[in-house]
Image: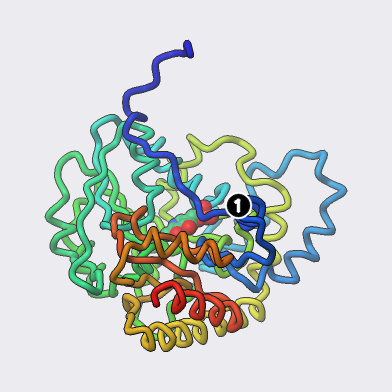
């Protein structure tokens, strides 16, 4: 087919392979009641307060959204002790990653990431002709290695992506590790601390990154309403950073990037502490339940945080994925992350976890 020549930098981009939607699996395999434990969503659903607020705005959908996200930014600024000028809201955190690349990456510029990690960092970089410098996490437990991260920095480095808990491994960076890395980092480099799963970290000491921002250090914290807040379908994420960084991102943001239902639901969800508590309790229990069930099969999850587990099955995980799919359970196969014997499974409700464990035992037997 005749068409213009693609930009060469996008030759390197592999289209994103999302977790399969329930409807697609049900349609293709003729199944009913398919269980999705593939995208780290919240099985308890959105906060009831968010649903109530959504109903209230349906009659206003003929208006454009507030391009400044005034009420949501106010609420976020208040919650975290910042000013609205230090907050940006995006159409999911994914959009904020694109804004980062648009604002800071010239062709040939580099960003340090860990390996394996969330694929959208590389996607955003590649779109702008940027080059990822992945630093492998260490050993069987996929530990952060601040020395190795520092060793990957050079004069072309613009950004460093630190995902903690890291998707897909769950790895956590400790406050001391982050501090040792930040201490010697040239201030021309922006550290992006992706905290999509931070609300699920309870037992371990974990840096929140906010003090660095208060000191005016070049650090951006990314958070999302897609995970514990249960609003993945509305697409809303946010960033906190020194005002200069936020101003750069706002330059390349489209005017109405966050839709009205997303803004309204996010404000309501932010205040619903009950829903957060319930969701966290479910995940804490679910992690224990899954770990115990996996241990009975001689398997062990990578230690860490998040509402998901990364597990070495010791066998071809694509086959495990396919066999679970036939039984109506969707997980992620580790081959997409470069780990062909691992799987990543999202913590579900007690009953969902039980179904997964039972099916996995059958598949591995
Ligand atoms: C580490 C990490 N960051 C960001 C995102 C994207 O979140 P959002 O739905 O806000 O775009 C995800 C989603 O899976 C993720 O795992």
Determine whether 209 is above or below 134 in the image. below
Circle 1 Cα neighbour tier, 10 Å, few/some/many (<14 / 14–19 / ≥20): many
Extreme-front residue of the structure: 365
Where 104 falls versus 226 (above or below)? above
Asked if ligand 1 lies within 8 A of label 1, the reply is yes
Tell me if I can see residue 97 in this picture.
yes
Q: Residue furthest top?
A: 2
User: What residue is at 58 percent from the left and 83 percent from the top?
Assistant: 350
Image position, residue 231 (x, y; %): 63, 61
- Closer-to-camera residue (230/349): 349
User: Residue 34 occupies which quadrant of the picture?
Assistant: bottom right
Which residue position holds label 1? 235
Nearer to me, 262 or 88: 262
Q: On the rendered structure, is 53 left or right of 27? A: right
Residue at point 58% right, 65% down?
328
257 and 295: which is toward the camera: 295
Q: Position of residue 265 (x, y in %)?
A: 70, 60
Where residue 347 sits in the image (x, y, percent)?
Answer: 51, 75
């Amino acid at each position: 087919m005749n068409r213009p020549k693609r930009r060469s930098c996008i030759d390197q981009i592999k289209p994103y392979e999302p977790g399969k939607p329930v409807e697609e699996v049900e349609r293709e395999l003729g199944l009913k009641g398919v269980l999705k434990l593939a995208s780290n969503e919240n099985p308890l659903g959105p906060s009831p307060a968010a649903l109530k607020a959504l109903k209230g705005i349906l009659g206003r959908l003929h208006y454009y959204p507030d391009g400044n996200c005034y009420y949501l930014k106010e609420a976020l600024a208040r919650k975290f002790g910042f000013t609205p000028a230090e907050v940006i809201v995006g159409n999911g955190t994914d959009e904020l990653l694109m804004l980062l690349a648009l604002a800071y990456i010239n062709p040939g510029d580099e960003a340090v990431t860990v390996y394996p990690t969330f694929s959208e960092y590389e996607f955003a970089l590649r779109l702008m002709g940027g080059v990822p410098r992945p630093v492998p996490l260490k050993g069987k437990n996929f530990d952060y290695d601040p020395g190795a991260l520092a060793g990957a920095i050079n004069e072309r480095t613009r950004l460093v992506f630190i995902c903690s808990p890291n998707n897909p491994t769950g790895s956590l960076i400790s406050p001391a590790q982050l501090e040792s890395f930040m201490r010697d980092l040239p201030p021309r480099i922006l550290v992006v601390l992706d905290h999509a799963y931070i609300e699920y970290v309870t037992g371990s000491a974990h840096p929140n990154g906010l003090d660095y921002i208060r000191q005016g250090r070049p650090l951006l914290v990314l958070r999302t309403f897609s995970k514990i807040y249960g609003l993945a379908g509305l697409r809303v994420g946010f960033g906190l950073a020194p005002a200069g960084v936020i101003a750069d991102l706002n330059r390349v943001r489209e005017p109405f990037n966050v839709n009205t239902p997303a803004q309204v639901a996010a404000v309501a969800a932010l205040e619903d502490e009950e829903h957060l508590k319930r969701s966290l309790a479910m995940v804490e229990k679910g992690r224990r339940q899954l770990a115990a069930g996996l241990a009975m099969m001689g398997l062990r999850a990578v230690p860490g945080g998040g509402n998901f587990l990364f597990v070495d099955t010791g066998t071809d995980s694509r086959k495990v994925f396919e066999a679970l799919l036939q039984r109506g359970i969707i997980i992620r196969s580790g081959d997409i992350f470069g780990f062909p014997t691992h799987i990543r499974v999202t913590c579900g409700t007690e009953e969902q976890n039980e179904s997964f464990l039972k099916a996995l035992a059958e598949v591995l037997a």
